[in-house]
């Protein structure tokens, strides 16, 4: 939806009746708020899940919210009818200078979520936004547009992943909300699908979801967290998924659950994808079944092209038959045709690398690309087959594409609940015996909260593997990056605790990647 920019004068008729003090307070219901349409009153304040923005363009951004007066009730406590939602975007937090506004419709078949694709904004500029429905105002969100084409000025961003609600508090999100970043990249495991357990500090609301209503309730559990709401309200996010948005370690139509046939699992995947779309600020059409393309590109001026991957939906099954996906090397790792991206996405990715004229290629990836031998013994390696180590032929193709087509590729990765910095090296065996050559860099962020039980293993194996510059399995948090024409600087931001609701945050390690010199150095 394209929305014309209106002058403040044009908006005064509405704005005058509201005033700053009205934000967050119950307003007198007025036909103006509802665009003259009658709607049944809601059972309570509807903005319990917060607000978010995402997918920044130079002149546009997506605004998101979902009406749910009773988040865990069926349909979030909403009536089975559409509800109009007013939205407005301003230069200032007090909404004195509103630059765009309109009315979206929250529909029952979209769980009363709204995705407003605002256009007509200015590049590299901060904006504030809010919604109104049923006489209630939402919290105020802040967002930022992308740099204009041609600009190669500094961009600050953060990336994060893996926020198991049960395992800890979202102190990392509270810190991220306060950081001065232009955009946040979410690399997957926004929800975890497990039923309630006693493993952590709080519990999931119900059993493992398989239908859309249960996935909606799971998102509602996560979205009601105040710290997560703060981080989503503070910055635009670019969101991709990994496995737990559907089911642990799934691969295309293969469930990890033994009692689901591929046909049953595809129904479940459709439900999970639907709920994902309903709860994320994405510029994507609503999914209509189990097949849903979310891989996409965004430009950060001429500084960086952001390639957002989906390595779950199209992958071949994990190789080597290990039920826990970790084990000794086997021939299946090197079967041609084994894929994490699928042929279409792979063509799209390599074509995008070839066409990009930006200084950097940033790749939002799920599972670790660089090789890891978890035994530390070169004679008897142990691999995690769920990551690119299980798909080595395709990894070779990616590194080859980096080498041929990309000026400065940096892969940012989630999934493994631990921090890593990897030099991406073309394997001499795969390149006809040529000497190893670093063609890119990988930064793996730790989890917001999800646990990593093998921290001591990382401590032991990192010194044995020269491509791994850093590894840490003890800490939780996120990675904050500062990108210029000349260099990328990454600060690994770690929380002091995830089981205390008030914890401190500090930088545990910093690395620099210089443009033109692939590979990372300690800052
Ligand atoms: Fe995870
Ligand atoms: Ca994962």
Image (tube, grey):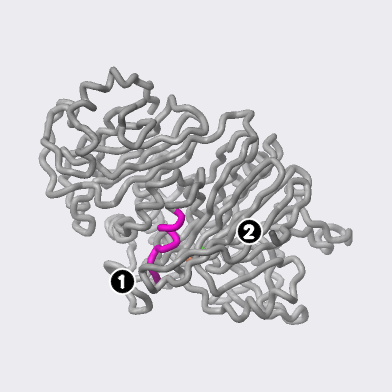
Give the main secondary structure, helix, strand or loop, of the magenta stretch: helix
In terms of depth relative to the viewer, which is nearer, 34 or 240? 34
Residue 371 on the magenta span: no
Q: Which mark is residue 443?
A: 2
Circle 2: is it few (<14), some (14-19), or many (20+) Cα within 10 Å?
many
For label 1, being within 8 Å of ligand 1 is answered no
For residue 158, above or below residue 195: above
Q: Is residue 415 something that shows in the picture?
A: no
Which segment is the magenta one? 168-176
For residue 465, above or below residue 237: below
The quarter of the rendered structure image containing the C terminus is bottom right
Picture coordinates of residue 243, whole percent (x, y): 48, 61
For label 2, being within 8 Å of ligand 1 is answered no
Residue 172 on the magenta span: yes
Q: Which mark is residue 203?
A: 1
What is the quadrant of residue 64 in the picture?
A: top left
In terms of depth relative to the viewer, which is nearer, 429 or 44? 44
Q: Secondary structure at mark 1?
A: loop
In this rendering, would 33 be left or right of 57? left
Instruction: Name the residue located 69 percent from the left edge and 34 percent from the top edge.
Output: 357
| Camera-side mark, 1 or 2 | 2
Q: CA distance from mark 1 to mark 2?
A: 31 Å
Instruction: Name the residue located 71 percent from the left edge and 71 percent from the top edge.
Output: 331
What is the quadrant of residue 169 in the picture?
A: bottom left
Instruction: Name the residue located 27 percent from the left edge and 38 percent from the top edge.
Output: 131
Q: Which mark is residue 514?
A: none
Q: Is residue 367 something that shows in the picture?
A: yes
The quarter of the rendered structure image containing the N terminus is top left
Among the two numbered marks 1 and 2 on one chain, the one whose residue lies closer to the N terminus: 1
Picture coordinates of residue 286, whole percent (x, y): 38, 42
In this rendering, would 103 be left or right of 38? right
Picture coordinates of residue 467, whole percent (x, y): 74, 66
């Amino acid at each position: 939806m394209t929305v014309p920019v209106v002058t403040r004068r044009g908006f005064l008729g509405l704005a005058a009746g509201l005033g700053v003090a009205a934000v967050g307070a119950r307003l007198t219901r007025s036909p103006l708020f509802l665009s003259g349409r009658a709607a049944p009153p809601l059972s309570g304040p509807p903005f319990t899940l917060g607000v978010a923005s995402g997918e920044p363009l130079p002149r546009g951004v997506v605004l998101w919210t979902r009406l749910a007066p009773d988040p865990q009730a069926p349909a979030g406590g909403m009536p089975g009818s559409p509800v109009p939602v007013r939205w407005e975007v301003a230069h200032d937090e007090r909404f004195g200078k509103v630059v765009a506004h309109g009315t979206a419709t929250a529909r029952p078949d979209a769980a009363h979520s709204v995705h407003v694709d605002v256009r007509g904004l200015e590049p590299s500029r901060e904006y504030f936004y809010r919604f109104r429905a049923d006489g209630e105002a939402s919290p105020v969100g802040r967002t930022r547009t992308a740099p204009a084409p041609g600009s190669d000025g500094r961009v600050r961003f953060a990336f994060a992943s893996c926020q198991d609600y049960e395992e800890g508090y979202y102190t990392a999100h509270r810190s991220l909300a306060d950081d001065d970043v232009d955009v946040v990249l979410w690399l997957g495991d926004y929800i975890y699908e497990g039923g309630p357990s006693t493993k952590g500090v709080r519990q999931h609301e119900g059993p493992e979801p398989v239908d859309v209503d249960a996935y909606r309730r799971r998102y509602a559990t996560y979205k009601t967290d105040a710290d997560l709401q703060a981080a989503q309200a503070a910055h635009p996010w670019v969101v991709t998924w990994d496995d737990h948005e559907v089911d642990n370690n799934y691969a295309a139509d293969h469930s990890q659950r033994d009692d689901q046939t591929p046909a049953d699992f595809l129904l479940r995947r459709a439900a999970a994808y639907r709920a994902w779309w309903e709860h994320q600020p994405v510029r994507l059409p609503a999914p209509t079944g189990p097949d849903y393309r979310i891989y996409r590109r965004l430009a950060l001026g001429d500084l960086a092209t952001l390639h957002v991957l989906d390595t779950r939906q199209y992958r071949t099954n994990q190789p080597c038959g290990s039920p826990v996906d970790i084990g000794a090397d086997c021939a299946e790792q090197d079967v041609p045709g084994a894929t994490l991206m699928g042929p279409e996405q792979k063509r799209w990715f390599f074509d995008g690398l070839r066409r990009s004229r930006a200084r950097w290629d940033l790749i939002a990836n799920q599972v670790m690309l660089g090789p890891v031998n978890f035994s530390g013994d070169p004679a008897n390696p142990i691999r995690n087959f769920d990551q690119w180590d299980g798909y080595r032929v395709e990894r070779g193709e990616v590194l080859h594409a980096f080498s041929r087509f990309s000026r400065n590729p940096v892969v940012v990765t989630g999934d493994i609940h631990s921090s890593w910095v990897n030099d991406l090296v073309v394997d001499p065996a795969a390149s006809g015996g040529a000497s190893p050559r670093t063609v890119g860099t990988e930064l793996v962020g730790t989890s917001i909260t999800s646990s990593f039980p093998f921290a001591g293993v990382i401590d032991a194996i990192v010194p044995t593997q020269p491509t791994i510059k850093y590894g840490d399995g003890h800490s939780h948090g996120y990675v904050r990056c500062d990108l210029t024409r000349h260099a990328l600087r990454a600060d690994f931001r770690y929380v002091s605790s995830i089981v205390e609701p008030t914890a401190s945050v500090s930088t545990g390690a910093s690395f620099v990647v210089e443009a033109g010199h692939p590979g990372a150095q300690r800052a």
